Image (cartoon, rainbow, N blue to C red):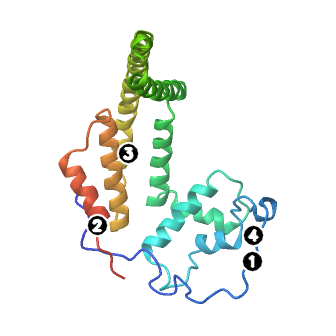
Amino acid sequence: MQTRLVGQCFSVGPSQGWFDPRVNENPIPPCTAPQCSLAGFDPESPDAHIIAEGQLEAGEYTDAVRWALNRYLYKKAYGLPLESTAMQDFFDTHLHSTVGAFYELDSGLEALYNANVEGLAAMAVGLDSLGAGLDALADLDAQLLDVAEENQPALLAARTGLLGDITEWAGEAAALYELIAEERAQLAGPLKAQNDGISTSFIYEQNEKEANTILLSYLERGGSSLEAEELQALQGIAKLIVKP
C-alpha cells in the first residue's frame, strides 16, 4: 500500500462567502414539477466551458475543487457529441491525466458491480422473501404469547414450516452472494493493477488511489472484513486536516 502524501494539504471549498446570512426579501413561491424541471446536461453550456477552459476565478476554488469539477465534467460529457474546440481540447488534455485515468477505473468498477445482473436480481428477490418471512415469524411469535392453548399446535406447526422456508431462502441468498463475490474477486485483480499504474502528484489524487486500492483489495478477498491498516488508512484520509 502506498503512503499518502500528508505533506501537502488543500482546502475543499471557498473559505469565505459560502453562505449569505441576509434574509431573502423576495422569496420565489413554490413551483409545480413542470416549472421546476431542468434541461438535461449540456456539454456546450457556458458553465461547462468555464470548467473546461480553466477559467474558474483564482482564489475562489482550490486545486482539489478544480480537479473534482474536471472529473465531473469529464464523466458527464464523455461519449457525447462535442462541437466546440474547447471541449475537444478538454478531453485531449485529460485523456492521459488522472481525470481520465480515474474515469476509466470507475467505469471498470461500474462494470464489475453490474457483471451478474441476473444473479443480483435473484439475490434481491431472495432477500425480500427472507425479510418478509422474518416479519411473518415475528407475528407468529406475538400470536403465540396470547393465543389459547388449544390453538397453539396449529401456530407452532405454521412456525416450523415458516422456519424451513426462511432457512431455504437464506441458503439460496448466501449461495448467490458467494457466486457474485467470486466473480467480483476475479474482476478486481486487473482493476487493482490498473489503479496501481496511475501516477499521482497531489494528495487528493493519492487519496483517491489509496481508497481504490482498499476497495479493490476488499473485493479481491471476496468481501472479507477490512484489515486494520486499511481501516487506519481510511480514517487518516477522513480525518485529514485541510488548510487553505
Marks 2 and 1 close (CB-CB < 8 Å): no
CA–CA distance in space, label 4 to label 1: 7 Å
Image quadrant in which you'd find residue 56:
bottom right
Tell me which numbered mark, 2 or 4, is placed earlier along the sequence: 4
Residue denoted by label 3? 194
Nearest to viewer (mark 3 / mark 2): 2
> Callout 1, which amino acid?
Ile
Give how far across and how far down residue 44 sits, in percent. Answer: 71, 66
Residue denoted by label 2? 239
Q: Is residue 172 visible?
A: yes
Up-down relation of residue 81 to residue 60 (above or below): above
Give how far across and how far down residue 62 sits, in percent. Answer: 44, 78
CA–CA distance in space, label 2 to label 4: 39 Å
Q: Secondary structure at mark 2?
A: loop
Give how far across and how far down residue 54 sits, in percent. Answer: 56, 75
Query: How busy is the neighbourhood of tag 3: few (under 14 within 10 Å), some, or many (20 plus)?
Result: some
Residue denoted by label 1? 28
The numbered disc on residue 30 is 4
Query: How busy is the neighbourhood of tag 1: few (under 14 within 10 Å), some, or many (20 plus)?
Result: few
Query: How busy is the neighbourhood of tag 2: few (under 14 within 10 Å), some, or many (20 plus)?
Result: few
Tell whether 131 sits left or right of 212.
Answer: right
Q: Secondary structure at mark 4?
A: loop
Task: Please give the name of the residue rendered at 80% of the width and 64% of the height, measured from the top-left corner.
Answer: 35
Q: Secondary structure at mark 3?
A: helix
CA–CA distance in space, label 3 to label 1: 49 Å
